[in-house]
Image (tube, grey):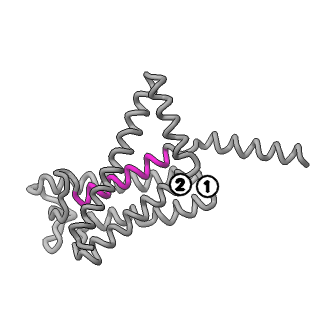
Amino acid sequence: MSVATMSLFFALLTVVANVVVVVAVVLAVAARFSERAAGGLRWLRDMVDGASLALAALVGLVATLGSLYLSEIAHFPPCQLCWYQRIAMYPLPVILGIAAWRRDFGIRPYAIALAAIGSAISVYHYQLERFPDQSSLSCSVDVPCTTVWIWRFHYISIPFMALSGFALIVTLLLLGPSERGIAGEEAVEEDLEVVRG
């Protein structure tokens, strides 16, 4: 496939991620004021339920493979800020994948912290692209952080794709079962084992 086709594919995935994040945020805010919105938020949580870690790992994997495609196949050289975003993204599919396999929801605060750091770098990088006259300590002359390799739908660039991936990972992790809910389920299982045994 051509680079143009792949960049369109990545842009469409970004739009889907944006829609999911916006819907989740709107429902979370509206749920404080409306029972109907609270029902919508419960429905969304039920859809994600125990798969939140696996879905977040999948998002991280797609983002990781996408960034590797853009640098290794499309030959878009990553700038220093791109590398920092990669440092935040690349461990997420691994740690979230292992956590999903072990059903270890205790990983969420660490994964959310990593995604939040990546998000902050993505926001900074995106605004640098939009306002390239700024000086930046992280940009080099060889591979400037202000180079826009992809521009789709009048708002999607590579840093925005990364930001969307990080935001969707955080959203999925927050939609997953609460620690209290998990601990409660484990306690019920332990009680059933005692009764059976």
Residue 4 falls in image quadrant: bottom left
Left-right relation of 84 to 110? left
* x 41%, y 66%: residue: 90
Give how far across and how far down residue 104 sits, in percent.
61, 55
Q: Decide whether residue 170 is among the magenta residues.
A: yes
Give how far across and how far down residue 36 sits, in percent.
46, 25
* x 17%, y 55%: residue: 128
Residue nearest the viewer, comparing 177 with 46: 46
- Inter-mark Cα distance, 1 to 2: 9 Å
Left-right relation of 44 to 10? right
Q: Which mark is residue 104?
A: 1
Tell me which amino acid carries mark 2: Leu
Give how far across and how far down residue 137 sits, in percent.
19, 62
Q: How crowded is mark 1: few (under 14 residues within 10 Å), some or many (20 or more)?
A: some
Circle 1 SS class = loop
Circle 2 SS class = helix
Kindly indicate whether the residue at mark 2 contacts the one at mark 1 (C-beta within 8 angstroms). Answer: yes
Give how far across and how far down residue 74 sits, in percent.
24, 74
Above or below for 2 versus 113: below
Q: Mark 2 points at which residue?
A: 53
Q: Which of marks 1 and 2 is nearer the N terminus?
A: 2
Q: Decide whether residue 27 is among the magenta residues.
A: no
Tell me which amino acid carries mark 1: Asp
Look at the image and give the residue range highlighted in magenta.
157-174
Above or below for 128 versus 2: above
Which corner quadrant holds the N terminus?
bottom left
